[in-house]
Image (spheres, rainbow, N blue to C red):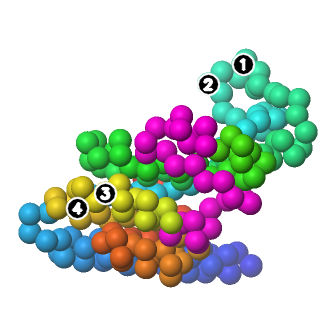
Amino acid sequence: FSFLSDCSFTAAFHHTRSQAFAAWQWWNFYNAQVATGKQILRINLDETSLRLFQGDGRGIIFASKNCPAPVQGVTRAKRRSCLTHVAFICDEPSIQPVLPQILIGNETNIPASALAALKARAPANVHLLRQKSAWNNERVCAWIVRILAAALAPFLGSYQPVLFLDAVRIHTALQVFRACRRAGIWPLVIPAKMTFLMQ
């Protein structure tokens, strides 16, 4: 039985290593294709869930064990209530402030009556999306790439954007790659379980 476990681990290790090698090959290919006078702009896209209510203290990390975790007495539905933040970060400090930051909320968390006021108060690079679900999906991800393309348009004379995406299914959808192609953004998929190395 332990022999099978060792074999499984070895197979998984070699599979991950070959995926990492493929990602490096794409990176080297992109570097060789950059037009003269341009430099690569590395951009990372990632999502995170933003809880609107703290609920119990599970999963919260504190520097001191003597500090009690904050608790809100809220219903289970409220504890599950969240927004999705789709964030972009790049390696050029002068471009970072214009990169879009997307907040996705559902119809309950972002009431239709409040949407216009919230958009008016948001910074120019923050985009609010109200839809049935607060989760990202393939269609929304392609829309987000188009927003990124619009933000990068003034810089395309000097930079070739390379968009690093983790291997979640919505990032690797055909419509997302098509949006990248139309925008002149080169996608680079980071293999599963290797995002921490890229970051």
* Residue bounds of the magenta highlight: 116-142
Q: Which mark is residue 63?
A: 2
Residue, disc 3: 152
Kind of residue at disc 3: Leu
Place of residue 52 in the rendered image (x, y in percent of width and height, measured from the top left): 73, 38
Labels 1 and 2 touching (C-beta < 8 A):
yes
Q: Nearer the viewer, residue 124 or 144?
A: 124
Mark identifier at residue 67: 1
Question: Which amino acid type is shown beneath numbered disc 2?
Answer: Ala
Disc 1 + disc 3, Cβ < 8 Å:
no
- Image side of residue 153 versus residue 80, left or right: left
Answer yes or no: do the residues labelled 4 and 3 have beta carbons within 8 Å?
yes
Q: Is residue 70 above or below residue 115?
A: above
Which mark lies nearer to you, 2 or 4?
4
Q: Secondary structure at mark 1?
A: loop
Secondary structure found at label 4: loop
Marks 4/3: CA–CA distance = 6 Å
* Mark 3 neighbour class, 10 Å CA radius: few under 14, some 14 to 19, many 20 or more: many
Distance from label 2 to label 4 (Cα)?
A: 43 Å
Residue 19, percent from left and from top: 44, 77
Say the numbered circle drawn on residue 179.
none
Q: Earlier in the sequence, mark 1 or mark 4?
A: 1
Location of mark 4 (residue): 156
What whole-number distance in Å separates the C-alpha atoms at marks 1 and 3? Answer: 44 Å
What amino acid is at disc 1?
Cys
Name the residue rendered at 30%, 72% in the picture. 184
Residue 111, percent across and down?
74, 45
